[in-house]
Image: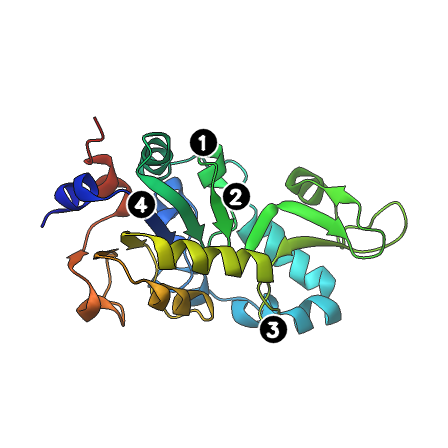
C-alpha cells in the first residue's frame, strides 16, 4: 500500500516525530553528519545538555542553550502544517514529539504530547514563576528570577526523567491507533523510542532519510524528507 492508501483507510492515526521533522524549518538535528553532536565545543553537547552540567556549570549551559537550542525565528514547515490539517480532518488523533520547538502547536495542532518538554516554557526553580523563551534569550549569563532563583527551561535534560502524565498519554494514544507514522527520528533515544513498541494497530509507517532499528518491522519505509512526503497527501 502507498502512504496515501494507508491514510485513506485509517481512522485513528498517531504521528511520532523526532528532530528530522523540524530540520526543514532550519532547526539542526543532533545525530546527522552536520548535526549538533558533530560540531565542536569545549564540552560534548551530550554533557552540556545534562542535569549535572546544568547544575555545575549553568553559565556554560546557557551559552550553548541560547546559541543552539533557541531557534525562535523558525516557522512551521510542510510537515507541521499537513499534520494540523490531518487533525482538523479527523484523521490524526495525536502528535507525539521528541522536539522542543513548539512548531506543531504553531502550525495549529491541538493534541501534541511533548516527551522532552519545550523551550517556550521556563520556570524559576525557587518560586515557579513562568518565563518565556524570549525572556531567556534577552537575559545574560544565568537567567535569574525576581526572587533570586535560577530560571530553568522546561526541557528534559539527560539524567532527568520524562513527565509521567505525558508518557502515559503517549502510550495510550500509540496503543489505540490503527496507524502509526514514525518520522524524522533515529529511534535511538530512550525511553522515547521504546514507546513505538506499544503499537498494536494495522499500519506501521516510517519516514526517515537514514536506516533505523525498526525498518524491518514497518509495512512502509520512505527515505525522503518528512515535509515533502506529507505535503503530497490529499485529505479531501
Q: Relative to residue 75, is residue 157 depicted above or below?
A: below
Instruction: Name the residue tied to disc 1.
Output: 108
Per the rendering, the mark at residue 159 is 3
At a point 58% along the width and 72% down the height, the residue shown is 47
Marks 3/1: CA–CA distance: 32 Å
Residue 146 location in percent, x, y? 88, 45
Per the rendering, the mark at residue 71 is 2
Q: Please report contact status of discs 4 and 1: CB closer than 8 Å, yes or no.
A: no
In this view, the mark in front (3 or 4) = 4
Residue 191 location in percent, x, y? 47, 70
Q: Which of marks 1 and 2 is nearer the N terminus?
A: 2
- Say which of 196 and 125 sits in front: 196
| Badge 4 element | loop
In this view, the mark in front (2 or 4) = 4
Marks 2/4: CA–CA distance: 32 Å
| Badge 3 element | loop
The extreme right residue here reads 147
Q: In which quarter of the image is the C terminus?
A: top left
In this view, the mark in front (4 or 1) = 4
Q: Earlier in the sequence, mark 2 or mark 4?
A: 4
In this view, the mark in front (3 or 2) = 3
Q: Residues within 10 Å of mark 4 (few under 14, many from 20)?
A: many
Residue 116 visible, this orientation: no
Instruction: Name the residue tied to disc 4.
Output: 12
Q: Please report contact status of discs 3 and 4: CB closer than 8 Å, yes or no.
A: no
Amino acid at each position: 500500500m502507498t502512504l496515501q492508501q494507508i491514510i485513506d483507510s485509517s481512522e485513528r492515526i498517531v504521528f511520532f516525530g523526532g528532530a528530522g521533522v523540524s530540520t526543514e524549518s532550519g532547526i539542526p538535528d543532533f545525530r546527522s553528519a552536520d548535526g549538533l553532536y558533530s560540531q565542536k565545543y569545549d564540552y560534548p553537547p551530550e554533557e552540556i545538555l545534562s542535569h549535572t552540567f546544568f547544575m555545575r556549570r549553568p553559565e556554560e549551559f546557557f551559552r550553548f542553550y541560547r546559541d543552539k537550542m533557541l531557534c525562535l525565528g523558525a516557522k512551521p514547515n510542510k510537515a507541521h502544517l499537513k499534520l494540523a490539517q490531518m487533525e482538523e480532518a479527523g484523521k490524526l488523533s495525536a502528535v507525539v514529539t521528541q522536539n522542543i520547538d513548539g512548531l506543531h502547536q504553531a502550525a495549529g495542532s491541538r493534541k501534541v504530547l511533548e516527551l522532552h518538554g519545550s523551550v517556550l516554557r521556563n520556570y524559576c526553580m525557587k518560586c515557579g514563576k513562568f518565563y518565556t523563551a524570549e525572556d531567556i534569550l534577552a537575559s545574560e549569563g544565568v537567567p535569574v528570577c525576581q526572587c533570586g532563583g535560577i530560571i530553568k527551561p522546561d526541557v528534559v535534560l539527560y539524567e532527568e526523567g520524562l513527565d509521567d502524565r505525558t508518557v502515559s498519554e503517549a502510550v495510550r494514544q500509540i496503543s489505540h491507533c490503527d496507524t502509526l507514522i514514525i518520522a524524522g527520528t533515529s529511534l535511538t533515544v530512550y525511553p522515547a523510542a521504546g514507546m513505538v513498541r506499544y503499537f498494536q494497530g494495522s499500519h506501521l509507517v516510517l519516514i526517515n532519510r537514514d536506516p533505523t532499528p525498526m525498518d524491518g518491522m514497518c509495512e512502509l519505509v520512505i527515505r525522503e524528507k518528512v515535509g515533502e512526503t506529507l505535503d503530497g497527501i490529499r485529505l479531501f
